[in-house]
Amino acid sequence: MHKFIEKVFSLFIRLMAFMSIFLIIFIIFFILKESLVFFRQVSFLSFITGKIWRPVSVNPSYSIFPIILSTIFVSLIAIIIALPIGIGCALFISNYLDEGLRHFVKPYINILSGIPSVVYGFIGFLVIVKNFEVKLAFSSGESILAGGILLSIMILPFIISTCDESMFNIKNKYLTTSQALGVSKWYMITKLILPTARRSIIASIILCLARAMGETMAVMMVIGNSPIMPKLLSKGQTIPSLIALEMGGAQVGSLHYHGLFAAGLVLMLLLLCINIILYFLQRKLNF
Amino acid sequence: MRRYAQGYFIKLWCVLSGIIVLSLISYIIIYIIINGISVLNLSFIFDSPKGMPLGSEGGIYPAIIGSLYLTLIACFFASILAISTAIYLLFYCNSIKISNLIHLVIGCIAGIPSIIIGMFGYTLLVYQLRLGRSLIAGGITLGIMIFPVIEVKVERIISEIDSYIISSSYALGVSKTYTFFRLVLPACKRDIIASIALAGSYAMGATAPIILTSAVMFAPTPKSLTSPVMALPYHLYLLISESISIQNAYATTFVLISILLTINIIASLVAKTGR
């Protein structure tokens, strides 16, 4: 009897594990398959370098260069804004707060990562976009900059928690030694903690870039969604928002539909490239 | 003198960014609470959307129930697959190559943006399997999204158990099944439940995967697995993007955030009492 249960359980676990891995591999191949149909008719190069996305007109044109550019642009703005604040805040939590306060502040910051992206979009729409229009008198508040600012708030908790963890460990490791040597706190931060924590800083950049580029709802609600060449204060459109807005309307099997899958594939390739670049950067920094 | 200036600069930078982050969080929380609570009342929670355009009056009861159902299906689907995969990796998988491959594949799916998983669910489940925009299609899509989250956490929880217990159990000739159910599971049951609940709260807030697969503008509380549903995040998105009612959007946000916070608090309590 025991033998039987043992066999059944083992079989069940193996089956389920196999199924889940099969499912994941299937998803990846599915996306590849659906987009390869598109690349048989439109060349990959013209798809990513052309400037006009006009899928439903009489002579349609499928090129997403401006959309790729705004995806990268928005994420970079978000990183540029969030990184100094995030690292500063991580240093603040790990070095300037005592143990009791730290246990209170860390969960508080983690609330940010629990807020759904659509709520961020809502607040961004009512606060950032409105203030751009009313207080700063921009013609349109919906802009790349608004998306970047909103994304920077969304990725802050990830930068902070990744950096804080390693900075806290480094501090605990060297605090007694550096105090015994009479080294001041800021010297320890600049010469010891920041250089040693650069691995986790780069890791947090990878994580946040991936999150920022794949973010759909929040960006879609503040960026204006028009596929034009992005400028800091102009509207733009990112790949996820393109898919979310047009997928429901595209006829399944049409070139437009396959083009959206191809855009998804380009987004995944972009993330892969960033991962590879930063992986080599990290290895180089490790001399 | 220059050194002192540098020291002050570093301190200023740290403290200032700390203050910016903390006040930002407080601002967001207070903003949601103050604006939400002034609009919220009981009939808003227990009423269906009414008015013209739809949603400008009435409540969000079907959306709350729809969101809860979607989350339950996603958690059920994802946790069976994720826990089995974790057990397989830790107890049954003998080859390092296979386990590396599985970790790589799970890393891949974790890196895929949720909208692309939604696109996959739309084509395969909604269109090719003819499920239509339905509870089950949305639930499975959300389940695929939270699968890696649960798998990674469960694997870590189980591997944190003292390996001494497991190896001595094997040494006594106790079977793997018995070891798992009598030794491993009781020790980490609560942590696993907490991690599933946290992943569930992540699924409940996600909008991108359900835009294409299950959420609709209006539907009654779902009767079967194949009926379309309303969901809180999608309802919120519609209220704003179609500029139907900002007031109701505030209240919806408040309800959504309170449900998520409740799940989070219960999950952390469950995990704590187990220790």
Image: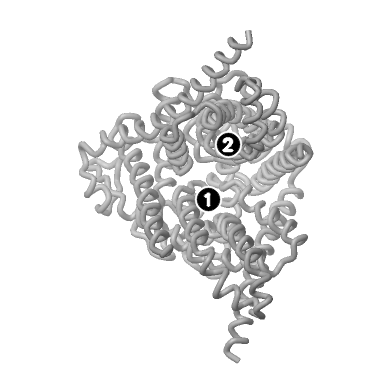
The quarter holding residue B95 reads top left
Give the number of the disc on residue B155: 2
Between B251 and B134, the residue placed more toward the observer is B134
Q: Which chain is indicated by disc 2?
A: B
Residue A259: x %, y % from top left: 31, 40
B212 relative position to A87: left or right: left
Q: Residue furthest top?
A: A1
Q: Which chain is indicated by disc 1?
A: A
Residue name at image x 54 percent, y 75 percent: A191
A141 relative position to B222: left or right: left
The quarter holding residue B21 reads bottom right
Residue B145: x %, y % from top left: 51, 36
- The answer to whether residue B55 is seen in the rendering is no
Q: Quadrant of the N terminus of chain B?
A: bottom right
* Residues tagged by mark 1 and mark 2 found on one chain of the structure: no
Between A30 and A24, the residue placed more toward the observer is A24
Give the number of the disc on residue B81: none
Q: What is the three-letter code of the residue carrying label 1?
A: Ala
The quarter holding residue B192 reads top right
Classed neighbour count for the residue bearing mark 2: other residues with Cα under 10 Å, few (<14), some (14–19), many (≥20): many
Residue A269: x %, y % from top left: 34, 47
